């Protein structure tokens, strides 16, 4: 009969051989596929890790940049406040200096006016500057025994305690334009004896 038994046996052997070859090829391809898949999976995981690290680095860089900008802003604000405070201190200093100069000038003018008024009052009381020596003035110039302010001139007697207030008059005329006219006009030092006032050293105003 056809096919013969031999032919059927050979066909069976061929089928078995093909099945074994197919099974081996499947195992081989499965192994290669598994290996490639494993490698691709590892590569994907590495890329995901790198992306995550890059994202974290970018976030850190952004946070650092924002922190740096805030630090610079605070420093600029601090400098601005310091400049404003420095300008305000300078303005206050200049204003105080101006006020001090004005006060110094006012006191100088007041002192000069007081001295002139006292000089005129004494001169009128004794009948003129030329008669001052008759009252112990001697016409000499003295200075303060404490601050050395000078020159100070005596237009009346040597007893400075006798006429040392604005109520003192001579022949009905006031002889002083300020309280305690015989005290030092700078530091208020006083000695009732004119002869104990040091002779003027030629230096104007208080000094050492």
Image (tube, rainbow, N blue to C red):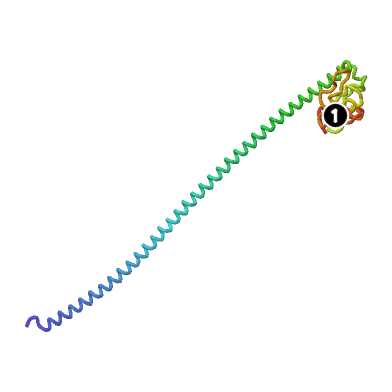
Please indicate whether residue 157 sits to the left or right of residue 62 in the image.
right
Please indicate whether residue 188 sits to the left or right of residue 11 in the image.
right
Quarter of the figure that contains the C terminus? top right
Q: Position of residue 6 (x, y in %)?
A: 12, 83
Quarter of the image holding residue 54? bottom left
Q: Residue at x 49, y 49 (%)?
A: 66
Q: Which residue is drawn at 71% across and 31% down?
A: 100
Q: Decide which of 45, 137 is in the foreground and name it.
A: 137
Q: Residue at x 46, y 51 (%)?
A: 62
User: Residue most toward the top?
Assistant: 127
Q: Decide which of 6, 65 is in the foreground and name it.
A: 65
Q: Position of residue 53 (x, y in %)?
A: 43, 58
Q: Can you say whether 117 is above or below 98 in the image?
A: above
Mark 1 neighbour density, 10 Å: few (under 14) some (14–19) many (20 or more): some
Q: Can you say whether 181 is above or below 52 in the image?
A: above
Q: What residue does disc 1 label?
A: 183
Quarter of the figure that contains the N terminus? bottom left
Q: Decide which of 52, 2 is in the foreground and name it.
A: 52
Q: Position of residue 28 (x, y in %)?
A: 28, 72
Quarter of the image holding residue 189? top right
User: Residue most toward the left?
Assistant: 1
Q: Where is residue 139 in the image (x, y as percent from the top left)?
A: 89, 21
Identify the secondary structure beneath mark 1: loop
Quarter of the image holding residue 41? bottom left
Q: How many marks do you count on the picture?
A: 1
């Amino acid at each position: 009969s056809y096919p013969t038994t031999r032919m059927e046996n050979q066909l069976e052997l061929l089928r078995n051989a093909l099945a074994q070859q197919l099974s081996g090829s499947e195992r081989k391809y499965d192994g290669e596929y598994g290996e490639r898949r494993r490698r691709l999976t590892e590569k994907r995981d590495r890329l995901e890790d790198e992306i995550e690290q890059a994202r974290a680095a970018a976030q850190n860089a952004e946070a650092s940049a924002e922190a740096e900008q805030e630090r610079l802003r605070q420093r600029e604000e601090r400098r601005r406040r310091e400049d404003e405070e420095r300008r305000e201190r300078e303005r206050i200093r200049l204003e105080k200096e101006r006020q001090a100069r004005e006060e110094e000038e006012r006191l100088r003018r007041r002192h000069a006016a007081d001295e002139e008024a006292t000089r005129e009052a004494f001169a009128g009381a004794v009948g003129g500057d030329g008669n001052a020596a008759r009252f112990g003035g001697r016409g000499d110039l003295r200075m303060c025994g404490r601050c050395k302010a000078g020159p100070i001139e005596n237009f009346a007697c040597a007893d400075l305690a006798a006429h040392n207030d604005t109520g003192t008059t001579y022949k009905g005329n006031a002889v002083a334009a300020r309280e305690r006219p015989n005290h030092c006009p700078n530091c208020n030092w006083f000695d009732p004896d004119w002869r104990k006032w040091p002779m003027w050293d030629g230096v104007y105003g208080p000094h050492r």
